[in-house]
């Protein structure tokens, strides 16, 4: 039988545990650690290129050499990993740049592993940045004389996603992270990696990725806005929590080693339920809109940037995130020091 401490000891005052900073640290339930952070980076061809992203102050499209410099600063601050996105010079309806041997992500991975061998390199596996139409899969537009509404084809897209993941692994990626939300893509990627002796390359699946208004600035950063329609036919409805759990369960069954909830702050309930139900290593992605809103408010003096960012990161950790992907990763690591 349990006894309420407040009933048995009416004079008990738990607030005494907050009397000093040392005491607060001692009894704090959730700890922040720079070793849990991942820094997203946007790679494009060139040298000494740092092209500002207007909607994301402090974030740039960078050439591979500048990516190395940015990653080194993050690593020295205590951030152990980066997540790479690529912006190709040319796009087509087969996303050729996504799986090209010398694609921009593949080039950048090789350079990072050469210059910073201890840095964990995670690669985003998707087709939207490489497709001329901006969608995450092959698009069927009908035939001449029989026009139909354009739609994304799930199954034919899986081979391109698998080829992309394999090309990243061959370049030296430590982790591949499919973000497309095509059904069956984790299984396709796991199979092709295993068949080519990359069975030890883990898959971090964007398992619960919602169709969200918070992605707005990312579309500028990755130059990946859809040329028609939207992505609601394959990304998740923000109203559906049970579906998110089913999606996570399917990805784990197909071979995902880690799972992700994206976005983070508006979906902390999903994050909590995913971690509680499955217990797998779970990532939360603090997406571009979350980053940009804090930046904009801080620039106007409306909020304390450091305090808001740290509180947000703490909320993600408290909800169950083992891994936090954030554009503020280097700043957070420095603040933690």
Image (spheres, helix red, strand yellow):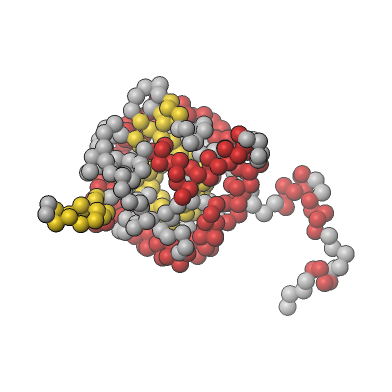
Q: Is residue 114 visible?
A: no
- Relative to the observer, which residue lies in front, 173 or 85? 85
Residue 314 x, y percent position in the rendering:
61, 49
Task: Indicate whether 41 appears above or below 10.
Answer: above
Q: Residue at x 40, y 24 (%)?
A: 49
Residue 182 x, y percent position in the rendering:
32, 55
Q: 133 left or right of 29?
A: left
- Relative to the observer, which residue lies in front, 41 or 241? 241
> Hey, which quadrant is residue 45 in on the image?
top left
Q: Is residue 292 visible?
A: yes
Q: Residue furthest right?
A: 11
Residue 143 x, y percent position in the rendering:
14, 53
Q: Residue at x 14, y 56 (%)?
A: 146
Q: 20 left or right of 135?
A: right
On-image quarter of the C terminus: top right
Residue 162 x, y percent position in the rendering:
27, 49
Task: Indicate whether 133 appears above or below 246.
Answer: above
């Amino acid at each position: 039988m349990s006894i309420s401490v407040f009933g048995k000891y009416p004079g008990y005052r738990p607030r005494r545990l907050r009397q000093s900073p040392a005491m607060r640290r001692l009894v704090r339930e959730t700890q922040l650690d720079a070793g849990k952070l991942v820094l997203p980076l946007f790679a494009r061809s060139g040298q000494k290129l740092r092209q500002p992203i207007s909607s994301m102050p402090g974030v740039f499209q960078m050439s591979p050499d500048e990516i190395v410099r940015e990653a080194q600063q993050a690593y020295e601050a205590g951030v152990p990993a980066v997540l790479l996105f690529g912006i190709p010079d040319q796009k087509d309806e087969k996303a050729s740049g996504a799986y090209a041997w010398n694609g921009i992500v593949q080039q950048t991975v090789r350079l990072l592993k050469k210059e910073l061998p201890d840095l964990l390199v995670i690669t985003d596996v998707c087709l939207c940045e490489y497709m001329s139409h901006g969608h995450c899969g092959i698009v069927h537009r009908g035939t001449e004389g029989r026009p139909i509404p354009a739609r994304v084809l799930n199954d034919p897209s899986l081979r391109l996603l698998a080829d992309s993941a394999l090309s990243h692994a061959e370049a030296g990626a430590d982790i591949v992270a499919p973000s497309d939300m095509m059904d069956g893509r984790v299984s396709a990627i796991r199979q092709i990696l295993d068949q080519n002796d990359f069975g030890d390359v883990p898959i971090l699946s964007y398992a619960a990725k919602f169709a969200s208004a918070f992605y707005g600035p990312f579309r500028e950063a990755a130059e990946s806005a859809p040329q028609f329609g939207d992505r609601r036919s394959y990304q998740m409805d923000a109203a559906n929590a049970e579906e998110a759990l089913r999606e996570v369960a399917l990805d784990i069954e197909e071979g995902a080693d880690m799972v992700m909830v994206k976005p983070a702050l508006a979906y902390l309930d999903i994050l909590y339920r995913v971690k509680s139900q499955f217990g797998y290593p779970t990532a939360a992605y603090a997406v571009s809109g979350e980053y940009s809103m804090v930046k904009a408010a801080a620039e106007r003096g409306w909020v304390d940037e450091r305090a808001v960012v740290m509180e947000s990161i703490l909320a993600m950790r408290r909800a169950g995130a083992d891994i936090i992907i954030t554009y503020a990763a280097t700043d957070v690591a420095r603040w933690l020091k």
